[in-house]
Amino acid sequence: MARRRQVYEGKAKILFEGPEPGTLVQYFKDDATAFNAQKKGTITGKGVLNNRISEYLMTRLSEIGVPNHFIRRLNMREQLIREVEIIPLEVVVRNVAAGSLSKRLGIEEGTRLPRSIIEFYYKNDQLGDPMVSEEHITCFGWASTQDIDDIVALTLRVNDFLSGLFLGVGITLVDFKLEFGRLWENEDMRIVLADEISPDNCRLWDAKTGEKMDKDRFRRDLGQVEEAYQEVARRLGILPEAGVRDLKGPETVQ
Ligand code: TMP
């Protein structure tokens, strides 16, 4: 297949110029990194699974009126998205204590939080994505107060909806990270959900056993990483029909 012009390469994805102005092709790699790329590896089939899982979740979110950049899946590893101006923030939502929150504040992993918490991190690899407050965000012009209000409102809706959706398939949505972008339509700007939603940027625990079904299996060397991602897709009812064989199949076949 003729390669399009590459616009950006991240740790887990590549963006190519799309077929029409204002669109991009988002390609999902099998590469995995953790701890700001200090740990690197490959999770076979991850790109295929994340492409599917993100397609599914973004589509469900569109249906409840959460605007996002997803247009359609093109093939096993690529999806067509709207080009947006990414807001340089990682928006983390937590329902249960885990990861950096547990470490920083000494709260035992697995403790259900009295209410959901939203945290902002400045998206900057050189600085290791430091946590920032709304004061920093407005002071340095990364987003306006109105933008932050829109981001928080969308994030809470995403959290409510995804928590219910995952619980319905026996999974606790512990925490996750979202990214947002500005979409310009003539003179009007609106904030839409961007990036991906997948086991790479969510903590997903089996509701009964507490077993981890997300990237923490890679971060913490727990093994069975591919299997965990596959299980998430299976429970959502979207595992590629041919099963595992399909994951290594031709990249451009639908
Ligand atoms: P944390 O506990 O390490 O701060 O992570 C919180 C959530 O955000 C967790 O679901 C993983 C996700 N996350 C990312 O998607 N990218 C990142 O760079 C980090 C640090 C976390």
Image (cartoon, rainbow, N blue to C red):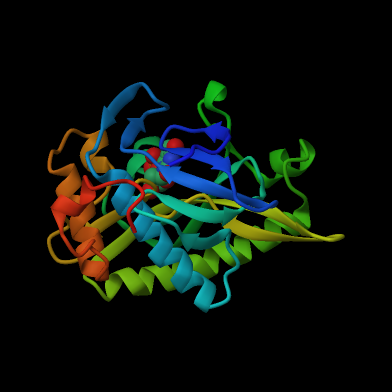
Taking depth in this image into account, of 216 and 62 the one nearest to the observer is 62
Question: Where's residue 179, x and y in %?
Answer: 55, 49
* Quadrant for the C terminus in the image: bottom left
User: Hey, which quadrant is residue 187 in on the image?
Assistant: bottom right
Question: Where's residue 243, x and y in %?
Answer: 15, 58
Q: Residue at x 49, y 47 (%)?
A: 26
Q: Residue at x 25, y 65 (%)?
A: 171
Question: Where's residue 95, x and y in %?
Answer: 39, 60
Taking depth in this image into account, of 46 and 144 the one nearest to the observer is 46
244 horizontally vs 77: left or right: left
- Point out the residue furthest to the right here: 187
User: Hey, which quadrant is residue 193 in on the image?
Assistant: bottom right
User: Hey, which quadrant is residue 34 in on the image?
Assistant: top left
Taking depth in this image into account, of 118 and 141 the one nearest to the observer is 141
Specify the quarter for ligand 1.
top left
53 horizontally vs 110: left or right: right
* Quadrant for the N terminus in the image: top left
Q: Residue at x 23, y 57 (%)?
A: 205
Using the rendered image of the protein, determine whether residue 95 is visible from the camera's viewpoint.
no
Using the rendered image of the protein, determine whether residue 144 is visible from the camera's viewpoint.
yes
- The number of callouts visible is 0
Q: Is residue 43 above or below residue 233?
A: above
Question: Where's residue 222, x and y in %?
Answer: 15, 38
